[in-house]
Amino acid sequence: MIYLRLLFEFFKAGLFTVGGGLAALPFLEDIAVKTGWFSVEQLTDMIAISESTPGPIGINMATYAGFTTGGIFGSIVATLGFMIPSVIIITIVSKFIQKFNENKIVKGAFYGLRAASVALISTAAVNAIGESVLFDLAKYQSTGSFLDLISIPGLILAVVAFIVLKKWNPHPIFILAGSAVVGIVLKFAGV
Amino acid sequence: MKELFDLFLTFCRIGGLTFGGGYAMMPMLQRECVEKKGWVTENELMDYYSVGQCTPGVIAVNTATFVGNKVHGVAGGIFAALGVVFPSLVIIMIIAAVLQAFAHYPAVQNAFAGIRVGVCVLIINSIIKLFKKAVIDKWTLILFIVVFLCALFIDITPIIFVVAAGIAGVLISNWKEKKAK
């Protein structure tokens, strides 16, 4: 029963995703690798769509991943699975929010959790970079030339995008739209 | 019932009009829930927000559940949470369906090859921001390095790291407190 599995996998992801937004990424990657429902490459596309459309990124990614796996019903199930842990936990916490905020154990746990969360997102980023046109491991292995490992146009695009982001802090949608245009003009996918 | 419907619609509007969720949602929440509806005070909203950031799940859903709970109990929380995700559900489904139909076109493939580079840049940028907030002393730096390397080279579920880091955080904070005494 694919829908039950979707519900269960996204429930787990929702339960252990701390810090919102991209924190869901390592868990979605884990789902991708374990189930084969979608690829790491598709996951990167989901991030692009999630960043360019309204709504919380984590929810957008769950909806998209659910749709890829099981159509309309799949996306509803995945999104519900992803948000049920939040709703239950917050409903309980809201009864004693003041105590929760000042609890020493809670504070200590999150002191450690935040560092781990950034580390996990970094690992996921390394994998996403590996799957992008920036690196072509297959070509490097066949030619043995180090120049074939890194795509120069890709690297230039990345550096320029980063500088633009730091300097003007535009909405992500502009970075993604610009990257899309560069990709089409320079035929990044090679087709 | 009218109140529940109002909660659903208001959070629908908040979810549908904010890009990126999380921090981007704060101004919308202030306008709708504090200024327009008077459901919660500014301070309450800040409390919800800070707890919503450190409890599991998406910050927007967490904050919506808090506000809904305050206004109309458990059912209020559920309606507000459903409202905030509803626009995402509809918009993403449409985009995913359209993209699937056009995915084989060369222009679409090239565009996405470019977009994937842009996404990597966006992720790195958020990692830098998050890093500054989360890695604040040598202990959190050690935790970061250990989790990063383990997650990169050992193929196990991230849940293990989250649980282990939570326990480590409690132990380290306790130990630091004892040492300070």
Image (tube, coloured by chain):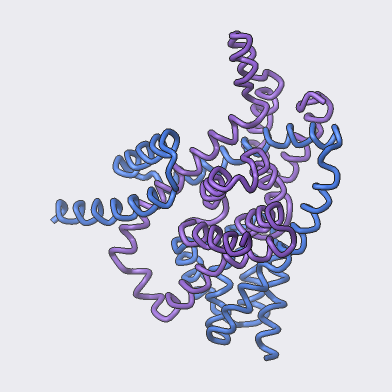
Chain colours: A purple, B blue
Residue A114's spot in the image, x, y percent? Answer: 41, 51
Quarter of the figure that contains the C terminus of chain A:
top right
Q: Residue furthest front?
A: A1
Residue shown at 65% from the left, 45% from the top: A38
- The image quarter containing residue A56 is bottom right
Residue B177's spot in the image, x, y percent? Answer: 19, 56
Residue A143's spot in the image, x, y percent? Answer: 63, 9
Residue shown at 77% from the left, 60% from the top: B91
Quarter of the figure that contains the N terminus of chain A:
bottom right
> Camera-side residue: A17 or B2?
A17
- The image quarter containing residue B115 is top right
For residue A62, above or below residue A101: above
Count of numbered circles on the image: 0
Residue A175 as seen in the image, left or right of residue B178: right
Residue A89 as seen in the image, left or right of residue A48: left
Residue shown at 71% from the left, 56% from the top: A67
Residue A163's spot in the image, x, y percent? Answer: 64, 31
Residue A84 as seen in the image, left or right of residue A155: left
Residue A173 as seen in the image, left or right of residue A86: right
For residue A75, above or below residue A43: below
> Camera-side residue: A149 or B174?
A149
Residue shown at 68% from the left, 27% from the top: A133
For residue B36, above or below residue B129: below
